[in-house]
Image (cartoon, rainbow, N blue to C red):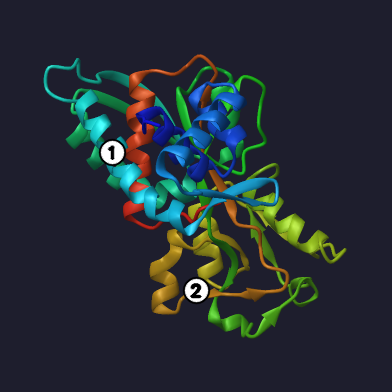
């Protein structure tokens, strides 16, 4: 049996997204079609590349060995598609980015897009996911990078990975060892307002122990929240990459919590039917930036 590009593409997205169903959505194919391509891939190679993992799938050791080679092939296909003589990606694109991600990723993303698609003119809006998601629904954005979105009918969510997240505090609080919800119950907490990802992560952590925090102060900016936490005004939930300098210099302490805080799920989102070359180009460049920075872990 012959190995095909379609099989490698199905394999890549099944690994990337963790399930055949998600890969089918990404490729706009029926799930049985993707399953058939994966089975044909295994038959063509004479080896098993997937195994069951709960309700999803994960690559076998042989599959992991194939993954890097598949990525190389698909990257080369992208280069051929964007080679000189092809119509360049051009025009404007309204892109929203969740603030915690934007603090780390927008600068290298702008540089990557300038290099790869100089005729593309993205316009960035930086806010919380709770503010960006409605703008996407109202056609005020073409693409958004969201953390733990609520999800809306007509919006396609492309999983990018997990954003490691923890409760953090200034050293002055003296919080060491395992920290449980009861330990933070009477310490001021800072969070973005509901229904933000930060607020839901905070509430879910306390709710797991059946505890209500005595005080949560609201701040609409993740950046200012990080400043408040580092200043010792409050403790709160932050993504690791956004504050890795403060963690390294000791001005912020990552709390070892029991239970752990749920990591943020990061998605690229756009309206059904809104696909175009500009959106594809930005998502492709974003994946490259996130990968080069080890920003996310695989979901």
Residues at discs 2 and 1 in contact (Cβ within 8 Å): no
Eyeballing the image, is 93 above or below 284?
Answer: above
Residue visible at 11% across and 22% down in the picture = 84
Quadrant for the N terminus, please: top left
Q: Position of residue 103 (x, y in %)?
A: 40, 51
Eyeballing the image, is 279 above or below 158?
Answer: above
Q: Position of residue 31 (x, y in %)?
A: 61, 27
The residue closer to the viewer here, 264 or 37, is 37
Eyeballing the image, is 123 above or below 111?
Answer: above
Residue visible at 59% across and 21% down in the picture = 30
The disc placed on residue 5 is none
User: Is residue 123 at least partly visible in the picture?
Assistant: no
Residue visible at 25% across and 21% down in the picture = 89
Picture quarter containing residue 4? top left
Q: What residue did someone put label 1 on?
A: 73
Q: What residue did someone put label 2 on?
A: 252
Eyeballing the image, is 139 above or below 44?
Answer: above
Residue visible at 49% across and 63% down in the picture = 240
What is the CA distance from the residue labelled 2 to the residue labelled 1? 42 Å
The residue closer to the viewer here, 210 or 60, is 60
Q: How packed is label 1: few (under 14 Cα within 10 Å), some, or many (20 or more)?
A: some
């Amino acid at each position: 049996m012959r190995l095909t590009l379609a099989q490698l593409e199905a394999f890549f997205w099944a690994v990337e997204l963790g399930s055949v169903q998600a890969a089918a959505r990404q490729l706009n194919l029926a799930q049985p079609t993707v399953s058939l391509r994966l089975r044909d891939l295994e038959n063509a190679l004479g080896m098993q590349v997937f195994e069951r993992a709960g309700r999803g799938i994960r690559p076998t050791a042989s599959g992991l060995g194939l993954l890097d080679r598949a990525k190389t092939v698909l990257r080369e296909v992208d280069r051929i598609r964007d080679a000189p003589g092809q119509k360049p990606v051009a025009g404007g694109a309204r892109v929203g980015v969740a603030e915690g991600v934007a603090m780390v990723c927008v600068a290298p993303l702008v540089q990557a897009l300038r290099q790869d698609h100089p005729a593309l003119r993205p316009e960035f809006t930086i806010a919380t996911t709770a503010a960006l998601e409605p703008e996407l629904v109202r056609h005020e954005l073409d693409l958004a990078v969201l953390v733990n979105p609520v999800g809306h009918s007509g919006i396609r969510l492309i999983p990018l990975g997990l954003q490691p997240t923890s409760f953090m505090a200034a050293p002055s609080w003296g919080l060491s060892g395992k920290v449980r919800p009861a330990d933070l119950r009477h310490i001021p907490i800072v969070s973005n307002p509901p229904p933000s990802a930060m607020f839901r992560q905070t509430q879910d952590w306390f709710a797991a122990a059946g505890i209500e925090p005595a005080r949560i102060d609201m701040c609409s900016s993740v950046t200012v929240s990080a400043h408040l936490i580092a200043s010792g005004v409050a403790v709160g939930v932050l993504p690791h990459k956004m504050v890795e300098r403060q963690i390294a210099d000791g001005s912020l302490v990552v709390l070892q919590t029991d239970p752990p805080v749920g990591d943020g799920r990061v998605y690229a989102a756009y309206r059904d039917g809104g696909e175009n070359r500009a959106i594809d180009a930005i998502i492709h460049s974003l994946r490259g930036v996130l990968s080069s920075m080890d920003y996310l872990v695989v979901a």
